């Protein structure tokens, strides 16, 4: 009886998950293995659609570049979250009175849609009348007033840094909670034993934060590989300028909705499947590695 | 009556047999060839949609700024260059281009340099396979855009299309290459602004007999869904959409050049653009014929020209990559 009641409670969620998540995923997966003529499905294609991704233009040039940008985005975000994010969380942890207010302030930007954030930052960074470059020129740093979003070498970094700025509140909150879970006594004991602040942080606190670092890393990986809205707001669906802000999701969008190719559903589903495998595999692998580390530290 | 896409992007919908053929219901005879092509299935040659509007490329200019600098509308390339130089010296950006948005660049190329590759004549040669995009005239036309970069805003690849429009409507730029679809936007951006339009004169070296050229294409196609439960009514509607009565309403109310021939334009600029096209019309080649596969001609040229403006590629490389890219799927009509 209890088992059946349990099922009844779970049923609505399972139904929603099945209809809106599982079913589309499975169909997209199956679409990738067929030939397509518009929205009409033809015969079984085996792995032809996947082969297309590695042999045909524009994928041969666009896919490696886009994937590279996703990985760069991941690396940049990781670096910032585990240094700046952790640092801010640590500093806030010691200011009991203003912690809540500051945490909220740091978290504010991620309440705004990435599309809006991207649009606002592209106005700020606009080369001819954007305030950032006007300010730089006004204080005599004219040589620093670069065409931020117009130059491929800076444009990708703008996407990374703005994303870091927007999401910094997330590691601050997570690390804040994790720091709250570290027992006070451990730090005190370490200090009694003569450990400096530095040693206490690196030898006692940080190892206990590893599970949180793991969670942040895996979530960041998924987030970075799926990035769409912010790059879209900065560079449109084609990753302007000259593909410098192209991401795999944008390539998927172009393939599925913008190309004149009649087999677009096949190749775009193959791309979606590939992206899923990369994300799923990456997340599983990372979790396994992190679990092993955790056991070594705590166990 | 769903709005469907035109030219290459219509083909997926046609291929999945989602649309009713309109032959016999809608009569598009006497319509512009380029417009009619947008409505057809590439494979079977049947008509599947009725285009709402025609778009045409044009160079807009600020009449006030031209008068201030004593510049007449140029009728030769030398006059065009002289006008640019005068404007630049006066501290005005001569040509507003938003090269951050790659899709605008093939249009900029048409406006500034279509006569240099030979407009309509090149169109028939390249679609029949007699030549390709490595043709020296095509390469030279791409180079024309590069040579004019000095008259565009600084760091042009950082300037978005909307920024370029703002520069123009704010009176900071004297000319802006674009399409008839921009007219309403520019007029709304600054109702005080006196806007004029002209066709850029042929650059030197243009193939013999080249005239100023206005490139055009159809836009906003409507078709009838094969699954529609009200097919009769839908067919009646698209039939009406192909009449002069409807076309006149598109011109008056939507302020677009109607796809229907013989419509009268009250807006003098719209009339002038439409007349330009009637006189020196050519298809906006990369859209009308090179969007039937991926990578599309407009994507390739847009991205390539960004690289050219950034200085990492020259006109020859850009053309070669365009050629190689479209050849992965393009087959000449022969």
Image: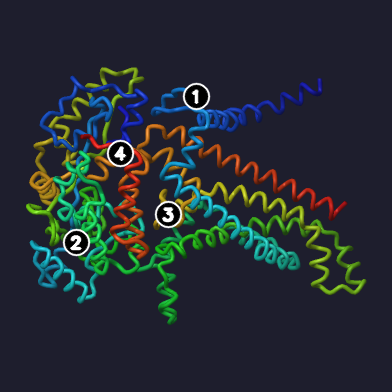
The crowding category of the residue bearing disc 3, from other C-alpha atoms within 10 Å (few below 14, some 14 to 19, many at least 20), is many
Q: Which SS class for mark 3?
A: loop
Q: Residue at x 44, y 57 (%)?
A: A244
Are discs 4 and 1 located on one and the same chain? no
| Disc 4 + disc 1, Cβ < 8 Å | no
Task: Name the subunit of mark 4.
Answer: B
* Residue B330 circle label: 4
Where is residue A162 drawn, in percent x and y?
52, 61
- CA gap, disc 3 and disc 4: 23 Å
Q: Nearer the viewer, residue B131 or A137?
A: B131
Q: Residue at x 36, y 58 (%)?
A: B100
Where is residue B17 drawn, in percent x and y?
34, 23
The crowding category of the residue bearing disc 4, from other C-alpha atoms within 10 Å (few below 14, some 14 to 19, many at least 20), is many
Circle 3 residue:
A243
Circle 1 residue:
A44
- CA gap, disc 2 and disc 4: 44 Å
């Amino acid at each position: 009886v209890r088992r059946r009641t349990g099922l009844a409670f779970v049923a609505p969620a399972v139904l929603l998950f099945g209809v809106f998540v599982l079913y589309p995923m499975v169909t997209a997966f199956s679409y990738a293995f067929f030939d397509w003529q518009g929205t009409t499905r033809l015969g079984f294609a085996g792995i032809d659609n996947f082969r297309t991704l590695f042999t045909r233009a524009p994928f041969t040039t666009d896919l490696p570049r886009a994937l590279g940008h996703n990985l760069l985005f991941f690396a940049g975000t990781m670096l910032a979250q585990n240094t700046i994010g952790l640092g801010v969380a640590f500093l806030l942890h010691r200011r009991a009175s203003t912690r809540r207010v500051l945490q909220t302030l740091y978290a504010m930007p991620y309440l705004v849609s990435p599309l809006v954030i991207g649009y606002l930052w592209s106005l700020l960074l606009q080369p001819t009348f954007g305030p950032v470059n006007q300010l730089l020129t006004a204080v005599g740093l004219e040589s620093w007033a670069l065409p931020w979003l117009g130059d491929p070498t800076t444009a990708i970094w703008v996407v990374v840094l703005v994303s870091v700025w927007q999401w910094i509140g997330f590691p601050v909150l997570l690390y804040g909670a994790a720091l709250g879970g570290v027992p006070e006594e451990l730090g005190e004991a370490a200090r009694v034993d003569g450990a400096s602040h530095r040693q206490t942080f690196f030898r006692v606190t940080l190892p206990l934060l590893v599970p949180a670092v793991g969670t942040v890393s895996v979530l960041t990986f998924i987030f970075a590989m799926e990035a769409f809205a912010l790059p879209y707001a900065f560079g449109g669906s084609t990753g302007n300028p000259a593909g410098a802000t192209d991401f795999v999701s944008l390539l998927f969008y172009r393939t599925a909705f913008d190309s004149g190719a009649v087999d677009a559903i096949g190749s775009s589903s193959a791309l979606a499947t590939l992206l899923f495998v990369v994300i799923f595999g990456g997340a599983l692998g990372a979790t396994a590695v992190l679990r092993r580390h955790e056991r070594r530290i705590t166990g | 009556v769903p709005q469907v896409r035109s030219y290459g992007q219509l083909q997926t919908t046609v291929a999945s047999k989602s649309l009713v053929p309109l032959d016999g219901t809608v009569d598009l005879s006497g319509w512009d060839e380029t417009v009619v092509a947008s409505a057809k299935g590439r494979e079977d040659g049947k008509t599947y949609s009725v285009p709402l509007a025609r778009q045409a490329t044009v160079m807009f200019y600020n009449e006030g700024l031209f008068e201030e600098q004593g510049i007449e509308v140029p009728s030769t390339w030398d006059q065009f260059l002289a006008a640019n130089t005068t404007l630049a010296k006066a501290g005005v950006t001569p040509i507003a281009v938003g090269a951050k948005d790659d899709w605008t660049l093939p249009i900029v190329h048409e406006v500034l340099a279509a006569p240099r590759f030979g407009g309509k004549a090149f169109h028939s040669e390249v679609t029949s396979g007699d030549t390709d995009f490595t043709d020296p005239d095509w390469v030279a036309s791409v180079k024309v855009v590069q040579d004019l970069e000095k008259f565009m805003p600084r760091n042009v690849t950082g300037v978005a299309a909307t920024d370029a429009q703002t520069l123009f409507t704010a009176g900071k730029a004297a000319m802006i290459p674009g399409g008839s679809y921009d007219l309403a936007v520019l007029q709304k951006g600054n109702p005080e602004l006196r806007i004029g339009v002209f066709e850029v004169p042929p650059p030197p070296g243009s193939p013999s007999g080249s005239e100023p050229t206005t490139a055009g294409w159809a836009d906003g196609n409507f078709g009838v869904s094969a699954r529609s439960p009200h097919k009769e009514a839908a067919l009646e509607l698209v039939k009406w959409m192909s009449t002069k009565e409807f076309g006149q309403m598109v011109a008056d109310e939507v302020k677009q050049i109607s796809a229907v021939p013989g419509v009268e334009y009250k807006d003098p600029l719209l009339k002038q653009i439409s007349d330009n096209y009637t006189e020196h019309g050519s298809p906006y080649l990369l859209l009308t014929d090179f969007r039937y596969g991926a990578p599309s001609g407009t994507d390739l040229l847009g991205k390539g020209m960004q690289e050219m403006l950034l200085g990492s590629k020259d006109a020859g490389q850009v053309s070669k990559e365009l050629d190689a890219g479209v050849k992965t799927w393009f087959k000449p009509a022969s």
